[in-house]
Amino acid sequence: MSIPRQPAAIALMILMSAAAAPWAEPDPQARGRLPPPAFADPDRVARLERAFPEIDRLFKAFAERERVPGIAYGIVIDGRLAHAGAAGVRDVRTKDPVDLDTVFRIASMTKSFTALCIMRLRDEGKLGLDDPADRYVPELAGLAPPTADSPRVTIRHLLSHAAGFPEDNPWGDRQLAATDDGMARMLERGIPFSTATGTAYEYSNYGFAILGRVVSRAAGMPYEVYVADAILKPLGMTATTLEAASVPPSRLARGYRLEEGGWVDEPLLPHGAFGAMGGMLTSARDLAAYVAFLSSAWPPRDDPDIGPVRRASLREMQQVWRPSPSAARRSSVDGPLQLSAGGYGFGLRVWQSCGFGHLVAHSGGLPGFGSHMRWLPEYGVALFAMGNLTYTNWGLAADDAIEALARTGGLQPRVAQPSAALLDARARVIRLIDRWDEREAAAVAADNLFLDEPADRRRAQLESIRAAQGACRANLGFNVENALRGTWTETCDRGWLRVGITLAPTEPPLVQEWVVVPVRPLAPGLDAAAAAIARAVSAQRRGPLSIKLGAGVAPEEARRLLDSAAAWGACRVGELLASDGERAATIRLACAKGDLDLSLALDPATRVLTRLALAPAAGGTCVP
């Protein structure tokens, strides 16, 4: 994000948006490499663990409310099964209890296993994601395209539900046991399209069944053999299988549906040609290992890449390849606006919410079962749950569990770490702010820096700032947005500075953007005006403002702003973002439902408000 070309107040808001990062001098041998982000809170795991009793209550209350016979669930932190639980029965007739070794069918969560097989075969050079599917499934060669200008269906289309085949959950759920010959005959008869290939998201079980056939042809062995050898065995998933008959009866969860107030047995379909879309069965212990593996792709780093699928390929699966319709909704008329934007990766759903910038998940539902897995890549936290009731819908329970973890204060993302080049540039800029040196300035600047703003002009600005602010000293904190961009604060005799730099894509990386924003403490009049506006926003009943409005602030516009800001709830004056001390300031208002940025100007002689603006805080994701 560009900083210097923004107005000063906006630039400062951008500077303030990055989280404070722990950092240390990197290994000189690592210069030029990307340092992985790291967690800042050493007590993070202990904090998260405080939510476990509440999560137990949430999942067990969900099972009781939804009348799920048996459940198993777990929380994975940093690749370790940190907490797990089980409740209810695996068999309503025998009353045998569920435990962590009970095996449930996980239905469409199987799609991620199929995608892993495809990615491994791609990495081995045995197929390409943009290969036409009919290269491996010749029965598709005669498939009539939806339009004359539609492309051939590729493996990538199938992985991301973009082939154009119709959504087929009710039909697909009953196809698991289809034979290879039976599926071949289906394919030869053709597939109707609901959308043009490559233009829209449409969930297709049929498409993933076809991918199972692609795996078999590219690997030269049956799908079930390849997934076991390439994925399950390397991960130690000894309880995981596609064939229910191979599970010891004493460990198998039987599936049920509710009918006329009672549980009715749902027979387990055997593995067949559609197994690659939804046939997998697994235990809580195995699923924990699987979720830990998928989430271990984050962050990108230099550690040995031990597989069974490359971390880069795992991350590729966890990016949006086909967007699905976005939504912004409220759970109630007075609830906050909630964002859900994203789509489908490869065998996984990927989206962004108001609280989290990147979530990855998949659910599974078949007659007799429902399951869910979800993780937050930047937070090192994952959860999963399984139940033996038809289409057990774990989505809201998983939301509640994430909220319980967040309330502990331990659910914080990794923070970016500075590169050696960024630390070096910071040290040089700090010296230049303190004392300009032509040689130092030339050494730190990318070729554009002094073309965009001449060196003598930048030097004069710094001299003016020093005259106004006095001597300045850089604080220890460094807000690192990424390996080549960061901001910091310098405390001065008469206020402070906000400084931000961005390095150029050159070797070595040099400073292409550099902003210095001086901030002066608020004079009493500005301070009082900000407090009055915060009180007005918070007021249950709107009265007249306790400050006079000048010609630049129309009363009806001021009232409209304050009425609209009331949606943010009670506010208090927070961090000072920009200020000349006497006349103008930008101030962060900390409100109950999110932060607002207040910009105001005051005539110091008359104490009349000459400017008033309120906006959602810069860098925020959602508004109430």
Image (cartoon, grey):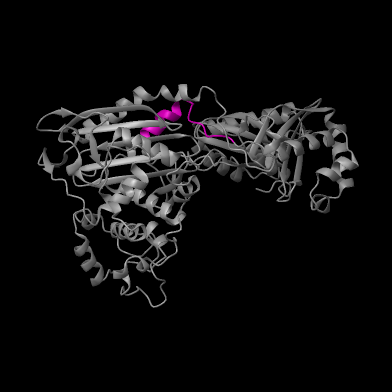
With respect to residue 522, does 226 lie above or below? below
The residue shown at (31%, 29%) is 58
Residue 153 higher or lower than 503, as above or below: below
Left/right of residue 272 with respect to residue 15 in the rendered view = left
Q: Give whichever of 245, 385 is nearer the camera.
A: 245
In the image: residue 368, left or right of residue 416: left
The residue segment tinted magenta is 400-415
Q: Which residue is at 34% across, 41% downward?
A: 233
What is the residue that sits farthest to the front in this orientation?
220
Residue 522 placement (x, y as % from top left): 73, 29
Residue 436, image x, y percentages: 88, 37
Say left or right for 506 vs 225. right
**Residue 536 is covered by the magenta coloring:** no
Image quadrant in which you'd find residue 52: top left
Is residue 540 positioned above or below 148 on the image? above
Of 614 and 202, the residue lying toward us:
202
Q: Nearer the viewer, residue 384 or 281?
A: 281
In the picture, measured across the screen, residue 603 lies left or right of residue 573, that is right
Is there any visible trace of residue 474 in the rendered image? yes
Give the residue drawn at x 85%, y 38%. 462
Q: How many marks?
A: 0
> Residue 441's image quarter?
top right
Q: Vertical placement of 213 versus 190: above or below?
A: above
Give coordinates of residue 575: x percent, y percent.
64, 30
Q: Can residue 334 be seen from the camera position used here? A: no
- Residue 346: give x, y in percent of width and height: 41, 53
Which residue is at the front of the view, 452 or 252? Answer: 252
Give the residue at x 44% y 56%.
122
